[in-house]
Image: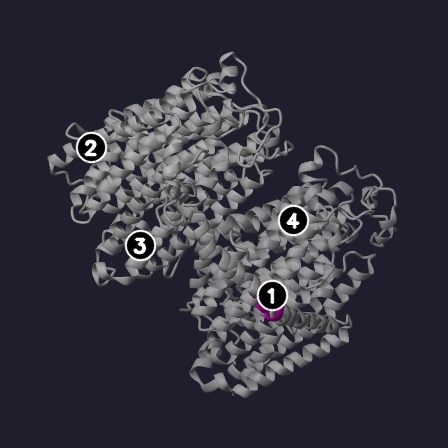
Amino acid sequence: MSATTFAWLALAMPLAGTLVLALGYRSLPGRSAGWIGTGTIVLAFVAALGALLELQDRAPAHRALTSSLWSYAVTAGIDARVSILVDPLSVFMLLVVSGVSALIHLYSVSYMDSDRGYARYFSYLNFFVFSMLLLVLAGNFLLLIVGWAFVGAASYLLISFWYRRSTATRAGIKAFVINVVGDVGLVLGTYFIFKHTHTLDLRGSFHAASAGAFVGGSGNGDLIAGCVLLLVGAFAKSAQIPLHTWLPDAMEGPTPVSALIHAATMVTAGVYLIARMHPLFERAPAAQDVGAVIGAATLLVAGTVGLAQVDIKRVIAYSTMSQIGYMIMGVSVGAYAAGLFHLMTHAFFKALLFMAAGSLIGAMAGEQSLQRMGGFRKALPFTYASFLIGGLALAGVPPFSGFFSKDEILLVTGERGGWHWALYVVGYLGALLTAVYTFRMVFRAFHGAPVAEARELERGHPHHAEVPRNPATGEPEDTDVGFPGPHHAIAERALPMRAAMALLAVGSIGAGALQIPHVDFVIDDFLRPSFGDSSLYATHGRDWLLVLGLSLGTALGLAGIAIAYRVWVMRPGSAARVRARARPLYELFVHAWYFDELIAALIARPAVAAGRFARDTFERRVVDDALIGGTTTLIRAGSAAVRAAQSGFVRYYAALLVLGVTGVGFYFLLQS
Amino acid sequence: MSAVALASAHLKGPHVDFGGLAPLLALLGGAVVVLLAGLIGSRWVRAQVVPTLSLLALGSALGLTIWQWDARKSVVSGALRIDDLSLASNLVLIAGGACAVLLAWRSLAAREAAHGEWHALLLSSIGGMSLLACAQNTVAVFLGLELLSIPLYVLCATELRREHSLESGLKYLIVGSVGSATFLYGLAMIYGATGKTDFGAIAGALARASLASDPLTLTGIALCVAGLCFKASVAPFHQWTPDVYEGAPTPVTGFMAVATKVAALAVFVRLFDVAFIPAHHSWGPAVAALATITIVVGNVGALGQSSLKRMLAYSSVAQAGYMLAGIVVATRLGVQATVFYLAVYVAMNMAAFAVIVARERQTGWGDAIDAVAGLGRERPLLALSMTISMLALAGIPATAGFTGKFYLIDAAVSGGYTWLGVVIVIGSMISLGYYLPVLAAMWMRPAPAGAGRRGDPPGPGAEALPALAGGSPELEPEAQGAVEPPWQARGERVLGAQPEVALVAIAAALATIFFGIIPQPLFELVHGAGRALGLL
């Protein structure tokens, strides 16, 4: 079978799973829905491996294959085909997405066990994987947009999964609205590009761009506008400033969903988009600079916010934003392989962190606040080990995977020179913050004196809340439907969860070995064919910068851990003292730099006010009365007239026939 | 003696290519066989074998059509043209005919009219349509038109004991005859002006001389427009449509709605885009104006109808208006769009009519919108088919109706009739006003209380039962409802008591969705049809 056949199979599996689960949910007993959902994704991963092997058999210059299943609309000016593009970049994404998804499905088999919507959950999750694979395999802009919108919809469905929680439904709506802003950006950007390239096909567009479709080179306004609009899409999907506010709220979804969608896969779609569109972005350096600056700003802002949050899932969510900031910055400065490498390692360790957090939340019976946690080291040894591995990888401590991938991004950034040095400094500042907030979580949740729940668990009694409460608001939950169920899973007690976490832990530790400077360049070499036309790809030079970066990264990671240890373990009161001394700064961080309030004040509230005004004046008078009222009156009158003419008497029909013939005849005679 | 021999030596009969005529012969031969089979005494043979035989006839016509694929030839001295357009129309007609046979399998109409005769009439009507679709000679056109119409007049009246059915047949006969006469008069004037009957020769004559602006020609064209508009139920010649559709037995209505339209528009395409093409500048705007009137009248008239068949009648008027847009522009793209929409139109409407047939037999509400209330809960598959059909008729994306409408608008815009495209869009907007209430009734309203199902003890709704309770000696007992097993039985949950009706509904709905997502096969079919006429 060819690589494209494997890719189609990888796409077909989750779709089949979705349909089977969605249509057959009533007749699936026990955990079978979970196993079906997991099985299809595992098969998709196997198909992705097949695609990888087939692709590697080909000469590097011929590793980009397009396959069209059928033409949707191929007429003058439009070439909308259902086509996929299989090249190293898409196969890389295919492997990461299907691999991590398979593990998270496996984890969910246990984690969602007592949920009322077990089959619904897995059909949504399979639908998400299908959409995400469609997004990364899309061979033209049309399918890309379809996949892009589908993952947004899947994300909405899963964030609002426990739909009896008003916080969850609100978060879902917020995520959906902001994602649609991004969709609009993507669609408009596509228009700007299509206008010049006259093809929807991705490779065709890139060829057209290199053949000079955009007159005026890097100063072409349409190209810059198109690329910036694509960036809007990427920012919304990848939670970058200023379209990032939905991601922390999205933590209302089940924890495996946070691991899969809001950490490992969907939010990295923006990174993939920029990497995929690099032939366009490299012709529009202005757009690249926008991406790099926004990425750097996000990584710093999110890092500072992560320091102040107390909800463990929110801390990890801000950390995700920050890490994706690194990736966006990386692919925007031309560090494609490094950015994608970080995407992969981040998928491993962030999914692992979320899974461990899920286990911890299970032990706390749904409670997510760090302030109520503590001392779980003995009660949850496996979870602790996993969290620690994920944390060390996130903090960038050698030899864990995050160390290599993050430093690679910053190395390429530094090599660009000029004002990119500012980004370099910001990146390392962010690395310090990352280490601090990561180990703040580790020390607060696992070290110190055990809380009551931890002590109970040590004696073998997992804690269950008497009245299930919404962790965000503390309201008692409606336990009827749209509710997680009374039991919360703990990794120590569920083999599927442990298996998934163990595999991810191996990835978090070992994946860095794929690309070690001066040792091996697996990722670089594998992705090279996809970036063959890039002038920025993998230009390794200055060794002193490499040595500086690696030692700086190590030092900052360890320093961050040391700071966290000093503040939260050695002198437990010092955090409060710092808070008191730097009150305004703390307020800024804990309110996430007031972005929610800013967006509300600048956009939401004026829009609501304008809407209210328009409703009271324009809509009531003009739309309701004149337009709708007028139109309906007109159409009603027409309807009445037609029915009045429909008397049922043949003689009238014949008369109208004669009249009609006369009219038509009269018209024609006027022509002569 | 020698004179006769001399005469026959001079009078050489035309060479007949039986290969090209084969699908038509299969249909007409099938009609004879079915008629004879209907004379056999056994009730089982009449009720089961006869419909099977007519399906066989349709099947063999289908096979022969596919056998003739890629043929581009004129047969019978150029009276008929076998090309991609006529073959594509044949396919669509046969599909519509097969659906009609399935819908009529247990219908009262076929029983009352003695099965053999009913099916023979149906087959000869399809034969007429097939003839019309390939006619390229005014004589053949008229022959086809009458062969199509006369059996239909009778078919409309086949529920012999129902007043409305008889009224429908009679009305159709009277108004239809006026239409036919108008058309014939028009053809006669064309012949008078050009001295030709062949389409190509007429076009040649119109192009050479300044005949294209001759009053006689133009009057002829005007009368032809009126006559064909009558057959295609284009306003203001549409008035028979709601009355006839409502009164006729539902399987016949379904057949008329789709097949007549296919045949009428196919001949419209051929007559106007081949024979009258030199006069395009004078008939184009007129037909565009008629299309606009049709779209407005059809959509506005359908609003607020409580009878589903009547609503679909007006909807079919509106759809005819959309399809005229493809003819008005007289381009290859226009022909393609029209043929595409015709194919889609058959699928969309058949799904709806099949659901109506199923409900008519199960509830006492006839074809009123109440008959489908609560259908989503009772028979989700039927409700889903109806939903797809309504959404497709309204032109919602991911259904073939959207693709077809998009194609038509594309054709109108690139043919210089942008305003007509706008009219189509406005018409579609209005059309949601009567398609969506059907969906609302199916999914959001409970079944009306006292929906006197057949077999239920007579309740408050029993008076609403159609006045056929008298029955006839021909009637099998289950038709009167007493013996019919309750349809809710376990095995019937999926397909219901009339598996063939549900099959038609589901298959048509699936086709609608399939061609909405994968339109390529249909595009390829219509590309050939577009090339057949030699337009730009």
Secondary structure type for disc 2: helix
Residue position marked by numbered label 4 in the rendering: B54
Residue position marked by numbered label 1 in the rendering: A616
CA distance separating discs 4 and 3: 62 Å
B373 in magenta: no
Front in this rendered view, residue A598 or A111: A598
- In the image: residue B533, left or right of residue B341: left
Residue position marked by numbered label 3 in the rendering: A227
Query: Chain letter of disc 4?
Result: B
- The kind of residue tagged 4 is Ser
Q: Nearer the viewer, mark 3 or mark 2?
A: 2
Secondary structure type for disc 1: helix
Dot 2 and dot 1 within a common chain:
yes
Dot 1 and dot 3 within a common chain:
yes
- In the image: residue B112, left or right of residue B439: right
Labelled pair 2, 1 in contact (Cβ < 8 Å): no
Query: Chain letter of disc 1?
Result: A
Q: Is residue A33 above or below residue A132?
A: above
Mark 3 or mark 2: name the one nearer the start of the chain: 3
- The kind of residue tagged 2 is Leu
Query: Chain letter of disc 3?
Result: A
A620 in magenta: yes
CA distance separating discs 1 and 3: 39 Å
Residue position marked by numbered label 2 in the rendering: A552
